[in-house]
């Protein structure tokens, strides 16, 4: 039973945790690592900020028909 992990494993667990794929044991090891590693604390904070930003966006895209029309117009303009 190994509690101390390296930074690359810590970052991997952080990524897994972001997507709700990390086990309880992995989360415990990550939190222990974060107690003494500034770099990984910053990585984790940035990861959490990125996740929060992505979840809070309201991106709207064009429907397929509008994309086709726009693409045709662009192709016509490029031929001129």
Image (tube, helix red, strand yellow):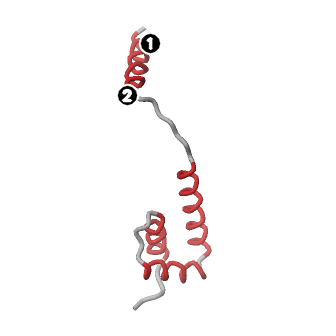
Q: Nearer the viewer, residue 2 or 51?
A: 51
Q: Disc 1 vs disc 2: which is toward the camera?
A: 2
Q: Position of residue 30 (x, y in %)?
A: 50, 78
Q: How many marks?
A: 2
Q: Nearer the viewer, residue 8 or 60?
A: 60
Quickly name the residue at label 2: 64
| Residue at x-position 57% and y-position 56% | 52
| CA–CA distance in space, label 1 to label 2 | 20 Å
Tell me which corner region of the image, top left, top right, bottom left or bottom right, holds residue 79: top left
Determine which of the numbered discs, if any, sits on residue 53 in the image.
Answer: none
Image quadrant occupied by the N terminus = bottom left
Other residues around mark 2 within 10 Å, as few (<14) / some (14–19) / many (≥20):
few
Q: Nearer the viewer, residue 23 or 40?
A: 23
| Residue at x-position 43% and y-position 8% | 80
Q: Position of residue 8 (x, y in %)?
A: 46, 72
Above/below status of 72 relative to 51: above
Quickly name the residue at label 1: 77
Q: Earlier in the sequence, mark 1 or mark 2?
A: 2
Direction from residue 79 to residue 56 in the image, left or right: right
Q: Position of residue 47 (x, y in %)?
A: 54, 62
Q: Nearer the viewer, residue 72 or 57?
A: 57
| Residue at x-position 38% and y-position 23% | 65
């Amino acid at each position: 039973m190994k509690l101390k992990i390296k930074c690359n494993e810590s970052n991997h667990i952080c990524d897994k945790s972001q997507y709700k794929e990390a086990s309880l044991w992995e989360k415990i090891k990550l939190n222990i690592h974060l107690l003494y590693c500034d770099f990984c604390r910053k990585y984790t904070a940035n990861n959490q900020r990125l996740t929060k930003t992505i979840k809070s966006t309201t991106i709207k895209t064009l429907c397929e028909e509008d994309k086709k029309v726009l693409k045709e117009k662009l192709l016509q303009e490029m031929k001129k």
